[in-house]
Image (cartoon, rainbow, N blue to C red):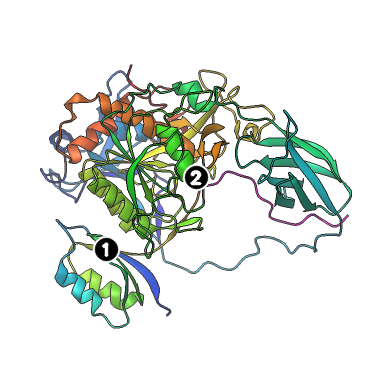
Amino acid sequence: MAKRHFVLRFGGDGAKPADDVERIRKLPEVELLDETSPRMMLVESHEQPLRELVESLPGWVLAPEQAIPLPDTRQRIKRTPRRE
Amino acid sequence: MPNASSADQYVLLPMGGLRANAATATPEARALLQSMSEGRQELPAAGRENVPVRVIDSIGADGPRLVEVPPESVAAIRALLPGLRLVPVTYYVPAIKAREQVVVAAEPAAAAGTITLRVVADKGGGPVGGAIVVAFTDFTARAGAQGVTDANGNVSLALGGSNVNLDRLYVYPNTAMWSLLEKGVTVSQGSEIKLHPIDLGYSDGLRHYYGNGPTSAGATVKVAVVDTGVDPHPDLVIDGGANTVAGENPTDFASNGEPHGTHVAGIIAARGTPPSGIRGVAPAVTLRAYRVFAKGSSQASSFAIAKAIDQAVADGCDLINMSLGGGSPDPVLQAAVEGARTGGSVCIIASGNDGAGVSFPASDAMAVAVGAVGNVGTFPLDSAEIDDVKPPYGKDTQDFVASFSNTGPELDLVGPGVGIISTFPGGYAEISGTSMACPAVTGVGARIVASMSSLGTNRDATRSAAIVKAMAASAKDLGFTPVTQGNGLPEPPA
């Protein structure tokens, strides 16, 4: 399985615990993409080892990063015109 | 994969966690939850009919209740109990991989035959550059050609002939003009298409319902716009903000190249005076911009959005406008929206533009989900907005729920979202969408918050629950079903 981007969020009191962050950082093949948020981290990783670790850490949730599209109500062409 | 239940069963539980205690629920919410025993009950709603609920099961005295609720009562219950979450019961099914299927049949290549059309202003005849022209030869099949006009107002479209009958012709100008929809039109080489200029003194959908906000409206209230960033504009004052896109300059909260956020910001807080400028619903708010769309991108990362929500809460924003949505339910984004509520802030989120169910994250139980309404007579009848008109009509027979507006039991409120004139990089433009309805409701929310002297300074769940309750209580019934209008159109305090 290819590596994907995941968002990790600490839901407990206060900022994300440094010990937990260190354990996540030390997972093999985890690349830390953004840890500037007090509660969250954006990482690139294989899912299974990351999920297993996060599920063992109290207060954390994990989700694949997803892209939310810019809203637009304009009509669009989906097909070229039929040949006359 | 989770699937929403088709039955009207919900779990009623505290804002955070499973048990109602001082940390997870307001005293009012705790008392109400504990008073709910199994069987049919009626929740008293001030000034309205009581709301029926059947409690099917519960987990302990202070734990969640499994309840059965008619779909038309869901918005009313969320308004009555803003300190509790009403979450649809979810069933899990095996995650079987979807089979491949044909979506669009193969098409022949476009035939030779390109027509150049010219788009001009109907007053003065000046060329309109940067307009998107969408020409449907077969609207049902969405077949045709589209392009963008050059500086001379010209666009070349491969329509497959020299004299072509169009089912529909849409023109979406960049700024300064109304959109256009012509049906059953024949075009040929050099055909001229005329657009109506926007008059900033015109009573569009926003001004029809809310007028021009008083210059002092919304003072003391801090509002976040989580969007594509906000560009400098003569009618806008931006207090500050952040860019939460990973790898980008965190202080660059100007637009990413898309005008969406600048338009949204103007609906809330533009400070101009018509006819030389435009006025938002709450011009005196402290407006902060949080950019979550990367430069040149039309997609925002769930990480950037969650981070922006956290930052807006930390910056003391009372209301967080999110004119975006459409992803899958996501526990991280959900936690951020719910974290905002426990931090005293309220996320006001567009319901989506698919004419379908309320999209995520608006569908989250702790979000205020906003759909769009319009009023015939607040846009030119030959504008593309005419497409958004759909019966049934409201108590005012000119009112309608926009055809694109996502609806469902999760909907809380509606706002004007059809043909809304607002600030745009380099000028002004009209756009339609729940993206526009959402900031209209946020603006009204800011005026409501400004009037709530009892709110105090504690930024907690009690504060956010009081804001949500006051917004719902202000809502006027436009005469549509609760599933399509939620509690109705919020009204600013007198």
The amino acid at mark 1 is: Thr
Residue B98: give x, y in percent of width and height. 52, 66
| Residue B137 part of the magenta segment | no
Q: For residue B260, which numbered disc appears in the image?
A: 2
Q: Tell me the residue that label 1 is attached to.
A: A36
| Residue A81 part of the magenta segment | yes
Q: Residue at x 42, y 26 (%)?
A: B489
Q: Which residues are magenta?
A: A71-84
For numbered disc 2, what is the local secondary structure? helix
Which chain does the numbered disc 2 sit on? Answer: B
Q: Are marks 1 and 2 in contact (CB under 8 Å)?
A: no
Residue B319: give x, y in percent of width and height. 31, 38
- What's the distance in space between the residues labelled 1 and 2, CA to CA? 26 Å
Left or right for B181, reference B301: right
Is residue B379 visible in this depiction of the protein?
A: yes
Farthest bottom residue in view:
A28
Q: Is residue B320 above or below residue B419?
A: below
Judge the density around disc 1: few (<14), some (14-19), many (≥20) Cα neighbours within 10 Å.
few
Q: Residue at x 25, y 34 (%)?
A: B81
Left or right for B314, reference B287: left
Left or right for A82, reference B459: right
Q: Main secondary structure of the magenta part?
A: loop
Residue B226: give x, y in percent of width and height. 38, 47
Q: Nearer the viewer, residue B182 or B289?
A: B289
Residue A6: give x, y in percent of width and height. 35, 68
Let me know if marks 1 and 2 both belong to one chain: no
Judge the density around disc 2: few (<14), some (14-19), many (≥20) Cα neighbours within 10 Å.
many
Q: Residue at x 24, y 76 (%)?
A: A25
Q: Is residue B163 above or below residue B376?
A: below
- The N terminus of chain B lies in which quarter of the figure? bottom left
For numbered disc 1, what is the local secondary structure? loop
